[in-house]
Amino acid sequence: MQQPNRLKPFFENISFDREDNTMVVNFGPQHPSAHGQLRLILELQGEEVIKAVPDVGYLHRGIEKMGENMIYNEFLPTTDRMDYIAATANNYGFALTVERLIGIEAPRRAQAIRTMLLELNRIISHLFWLATHALDVGAMSIFLYAFREREYAMDLMEDYCGARLTHSAVRIGGVPLDLPENWLNDLHKFITTLTEQLETYEGLLSKNRIWRMRLENVGVISKDMAKSWGVTGPALRASGVNWDLRKEMPYELYSELDFDVPVSDRGDSYGRYLCYMQEMRQSMRILKQLVPIYEQTDTQLMANSPRYVSPTKEQMMTQNYSLMQHFVLVTQGMRPPVGEVYVATESPKGELGFYINSDGSPYPYKLKVRAPSFWHTGLLQDLLPGHQLADVVTIIGNLNIVFGEIDR
């Protein structure tokens, strides 16, 4: 009996009416420059891309469905596995959404620690982007240098929460731990080192003839194209749109901080590179301002909301009711009010939004994630045609997509 062709329905939706002098090739999902499980179906005329169709789904893990079958606190560590290069940004985005749903706010000290972790995580993510993107283009030295500084930043994350990649460093209602002793001194040393090293990176790349030839006028995203495709983050700001959720819709302590939003009107890969480099400097500027704010706060780390947040360890050890309350929250989960909420935050890659629809049970009735990498991948079908095959590698790396947050 003839076996059915399971791929036929998919290919019926893709029309390649090609001439004899073109060919269709698969770029990925095994290609090392695919940055995850990306499969691009490319129609080429010689070395020029005529048509591009992104094909996603090779990494699907059903994270959103898992969130609908876990109590809220239980699901939080799973968010690490979306954008696994910036785990704290995912943790925080989900925690803030639940906090808005249940109507609580983290204490000021927790907000200071969270903002520190978010900006440190932004630097970690940007360094990873710079290292891998440069390696794709052929700049080996930058890969080694950027990973060196990234290790120092990950040391700080490990000192705080014990993990280097998947942090789970945020809790619904606050943070689990205060900053360790000497952590702020180590942070100061890291900022001093990175400030010097960024000069080295730019000295190797910014005026490098090969680097500029590979990036300038490659992958140009116009302002209209960026808005049409829902592009966010550095990719949007490099197209001349001054939009950063930390400024436009401030959360945590961002409304109190003095920092600039790097914007470029170039729209090409080189413009996005310039924005990423300046964003790391602004993150260090934010971190310096957070140190005195942290030192002036009291020691409370979790919101005082017995209905939704577990009591402190001291309360559990001394008060029978607090121990019972903790037991119920851990075993049965909180029961948020009926309603729905969508909260967006500025992750290192762009707008990361969580939508939760609550029916009053310990499990979300519906959970949906708006991940920036998904939209940036869809953009490739309009962006790649007209470029050379070698430029495909540059553009994919430059857009900074991570498939953990695409195949959810």
Image (cartoon, helix red, strand yellow):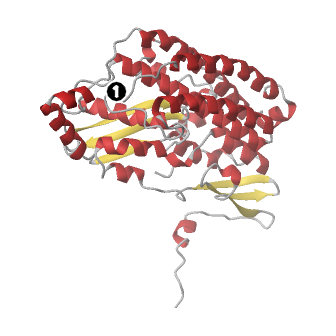
Toward the viewer: 351 or 99? 99
Is residue 192 visible in the rendered image? The answer is yes
**Residue at screen point 21% across, 37% down:** 326
**Residue at screen point 68% across, 20% down:** 193
In percent of width and height, residue 365 lies at 26, 48
Q: Residues within 10 Å of mark 1 (few under 14, many from 20)?
A: many
In percent of width and height, residue 224 lies at 59, 33
Toward the viewer: 323 or 352? 323
**Residue at screen point 76% across, 65% down:** 19
In the rendered image, the vertical position of residue 228 relative to residue 404, given as above or below? above
Is residue 335 visible in the rendered image? The answer is no
Toward the viewer: 52 or 192? 192
**Residue at screen point 28% across, 46% down:** 71
Dot 1: what SS? loop
Q: Residue furthest left?
A: 321
The amino acid sitting under disc 1 is: Gly
Residue underneath mark 1: 174
In the rendered image, the vertical position of residue 160 relative to residue 189, given as above or below? below
Q: Residue furthest bottom?
A: 1
- Identify the image quadrant of residue 226: top right
In the rendered image, the vertical position of residue 7 relative to residue 375, given as above or below? below
- Number of numbered markers: 1
Q: Residue furthest front?
A: 317
In percent of width and height, residue 209 lies at 87, 31
In percent of width and height, residue 178 lies at 40, 23
